[in-house]
Image (cartoon, helix red, strand yellow):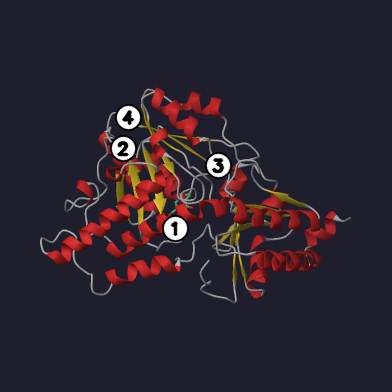
Amino acid sequence: MGSFINPCFIYLDNNATTQVAPEVFEAMRPFFLNQFGNPSSMHTCGGVVAKVVDVARESLARLLGCDETEIVFTSGGTESDNFAIRGILEANPDKRHIVTTRVEHPGVLNLARWLKRKGYEVTELDVDGDGILDLAAYRDALREDTAIVSAMWANNETGVIFPVEEMAAIAKARGITFHTDAVQAVGKIPMDLSKLQVDLLSLSGHKLHGPKGIGALYVRRGTRIRPLMHGGHQERGRRPGTENVPGIVGLGKAADLAIEHMDDENTRVKALRDRLEASLVGSIARTRVNGSTSNRLPNTTNVSFEFIEGEAILLRLNELKIAASSGSACTSGSLEPSHVLRAMGVPFTMVHGSVRFSFSRYNDADQVEYVSREFPKVVADLRGISPYWSDSMG
Ligand code: PLP
């Protein structure tokens, strides 16, 4: 399995970022040292490097089930989301309507809201209490002037999976371009784009044990899209700038490893997640799992503990050397609850006390045992000093 980079910490925040796999790091190393050529150069120093970029492209294409010519390397998920949406709008200036969902990552949602201020019309689809989209409402939202649908494959906070296959087919039947932000799904669940009607798909290296600052946009052959930036002819004219060669090599290796570990992710890692979730829900009163448990990523659980603050839980976990994350972010002194949990209508007393645990291939059963043992004490302590908890107890 490879050694964990910080043996003192139990890292359960893999949807935020993952450890670079040791194999990935080793694969990248030569491209910082002696193999530093520019892939566009005519000489051998460049030619050697151009070849490894192609090999990495093939690896990623294998993971996605697409052709290598359909991969454009970018700097990560956020750039890929921006490239997809803005690139399609620029190529279709007559169409001014965008369909997305209320639970997207800011890489899509903040872009859509910015575009709205610029005069585009944006429909943000609702989800139900389980984080699931209503396909009838989705169908109704599509219009003659809809340029693009952007819907995430899997939610970063809850792990809930959208019916991307059906949604893409519905968009295609109406002649609308379909983009999916699959940053959390790629490498965790199998996918075969050759069988789907998805036109554009965003992914990011650092979510699948690759390096940070590298990602890709899948662009189905024949899709009319404009580049986000203007410059050289790299990436077949779609993404100018000298390639991040070590990053690309790292992403290629991460894709190979993801294929190799896909079964582990969907069996052992999933079982670890399920064990922790069952233990927390079974041993702590007034908890709830947020999001559908029947259709979600194998590595993610989002649990709310009523009447306490997620931030307080995280600080106590940090003292215990457990890394997780919370659904709410403390911004400028005011507690801003997660837009995802709010969209799902999670009750106020639950929304603030949410914690996301996200696993990876580097977690094991001993870690789950430790967290299962320590976590109930943290909740009991915090509830002991929570005025809301004592009120609720009468
Ligand atoms: N989309 C989703 C669903 C994500 O979870 C993230 C990162 O958390 C991103 C996009 C942004 O990716 P990056 O950090 O590579 O820009």
Mark 4–mark 1 Cα distance, whole angstroms, equals: 40 Å
Dot 3 falls on a residue whose secondary structure is loop
Question: CB of mark 1 within 8 Å of CB of mark 2?
Answer: no
Amino acid of disc 2: Ile
**Badge 4 is on which residue?**
95
**Badge 3 is on which residue?**
161
Q: Is residue 364 visible?
A: yes
Task: Describe residue 392's horizontal placement relative to residue 7 as left or right.
Answer: right
**Badge 2 is on which residue?**
88
Dot 1 falls on a residue whose secondary structure is helix
Dot 2 falls on a residue whose secondary structure is helix
Amino acid of disc 1: Leu
Query: Front-most of 89 and 24?
Result: 24
- What is the residue that sits farthest to the bottom in this orientation? 8
Mark 1–mark 2 Cα distance, whole angstroms, equals: 32 Å
- Marks 3 and 4, the one that precedes in the sequence: 4
Mark 4 burial class by Cα count in 10 Å: few <14, some 14-19, many 20+: some
Task: Describe residue 14's horizontal placement relative to residue 366 as left or right.
Answer: left
Mark 2–mark 4 Cα distance, whole angstroms, equals: 10 Å
Question: CB of mark 4 within 8 Å of CB of mark 1?
Answer: no
Q: Quadrant of residue 126?
A: top right
Task: Describe residue 90's horizontal placement relative to residue 142 as left or right.
Answer: left
Nearer to us: label 2 or label 4: 2
Mark 2–mark 3 Cα distance, whole angstroms, equals: 24 Å
Amino acid of disc 3: Ile
Check residue 257 in the rendering and tell me which mark sits there, or answer none. 1
- Marks 1 and 2, the one that precedes in the sequence: 2
Mark 3 burial class by Cα count in 10 Å: few <14, some 14-19, many 20+: many
